[in-house]
Amino acid sequence: MVTVRVPAKVNVQLGVGGVRPDGYHDLANVFFAVALGDEVTATAADGVTLTCTGPDADAVPLDDTNLAARAARLLAAHHGLADPGVHLHIAKAIPVAGGMAGGSADGAAALVACDALWGLDTPLETLLELAAELGSDVPFALLGGVALGRGRGEILEALPVSGTFHWVFAVADGGLSTPAVFRECDRIREESGTGATIDDVPTPDADPALLAALADGDPVALADALSNDLQAAAVSLRPSLADTLHAGTEAGALAALVSGSGPTCAFLAKDADAATHIATALRTSGTCRTAHATYGPVPGAQVVSAPTP
Ligand code: C5P
């Protein structure tokens, strides 16, 4: 049995370029790993089976579409294992379809857990390539920390960061579909007359002020530099998110933004006490289902219990 802990992410910058001929968007995506995370436990079994516990467990698919199951099969196929055998149990804390890459995190955790359970010792570079096949956000869940993602988000460069930043995440009722939010972003661009393709939208770049704020460990400067090009699209599909963002700001957050494609909202706090206060205020605000105070950056998917037969 092997247990792997894996973080959720928030995008402190999500710069979205035009839609490419393959349907993806080029990104300047600054990923930040937070302590709010899932645990995936792999146990020797016949075939690939899944179970899930946690407040959102009912919303998690337990068939072969789950990224954890796909990860187990992909790793087995890469090593020519004809008959992969693993039961994967997901202890889910990351909001489902929430814009925090929870499904991607479970895929990354399953890669690491199966690699240890099956004694494969796959190099990190190979795991990162397999992760990119699974989805744009999966490689970052392996790496953790803070990283710039280029391309569709899968080409990663670790970024320097100092200290700890304190965050609050407000969880919405129900999820948002990532493809639908990207399509809404394109629609808004078309409607505004700028166009939405790679010929119309300049390729985004990392914001130097944001990179400096991370390197300096300065939450006030980071708050000024946070940006998410998908925010308008997420709020357009779910107008009530404006109320959630407002409630967190009223409670003293340095900044508020939609996390990735949403609908989870992220709030940067000046310290741990402020984060606890903002989370309490959000929970009673009536603008979200619940709220969690957490911190980061934290490492990527890691074995937390030694493999046992
Ligand atoms: O890579 P992944 O399967 O996680 O992406 C889910 C969907 O999000 C894609 O099918 C696409 O619609 C959208 N997407 C995008 N541009 C990206 C990443 C994702 O349009 N860079």
Image (cartoon, rainbow, N blue to C red):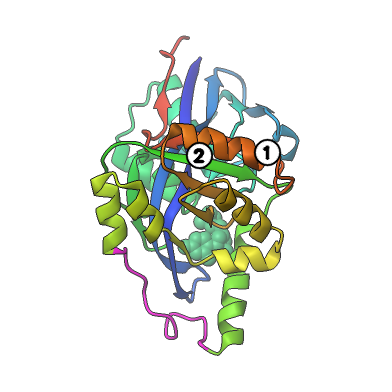
Instruction: Report the magenta residues as a range.
Output: 194-207
Q: Quadrant of residue 289?
A: top right
Counting from the top left corner in percent of width and height, residue 256 is at 52, 54
Residue extending farthest to the top is 309
Q: Nearer the viewer, residue 278 or 24?
A: 278
Q: Who's the residue at 36% across and 47% down the image?
A: 219
Residue 205 located within the stretch drawn in magenta: yes
Q: Nearer the viewer, residue 291 or 174?
A: 291
Depicted 190 relative to depicted 297: above or below: below
Q: Who's the residue at 70% across and 64% down the image?
A: 239
Q: Who's the residue at 57% across and 76% down the image?
A: 186
- Check disc 2 and report its element: helix, strand or loop: helix
Task: Say which amino acid is labelled 2.
Answer: Ala
Measure the C-alpha gap from mark 1 to mark 2: 25 Å
Q: Nearer the viewer, mark 1 or mark 2?
A: 1
The numbered dot on residue 95 is none
Q: How crowded is the residue under tag 2: few (<14 C-alpha within 10 Å), some, or many (20+)? A: many
The numbered dot on residue 105 is 2
Counting from the top left corner in percent of width and height, residue 26 is at 42, 68
Q: Who's the residue at 34% across and 40% down the image?
A: 145
Residue 160 located within the stretch drawn in magenta: no
Q: How crowded is the residue under tag 1: few (<14 C-alpha within 10 Å), some, or many (20+)? A: some
Task: Say which amino acid is labelled 1.
Answer: Arg
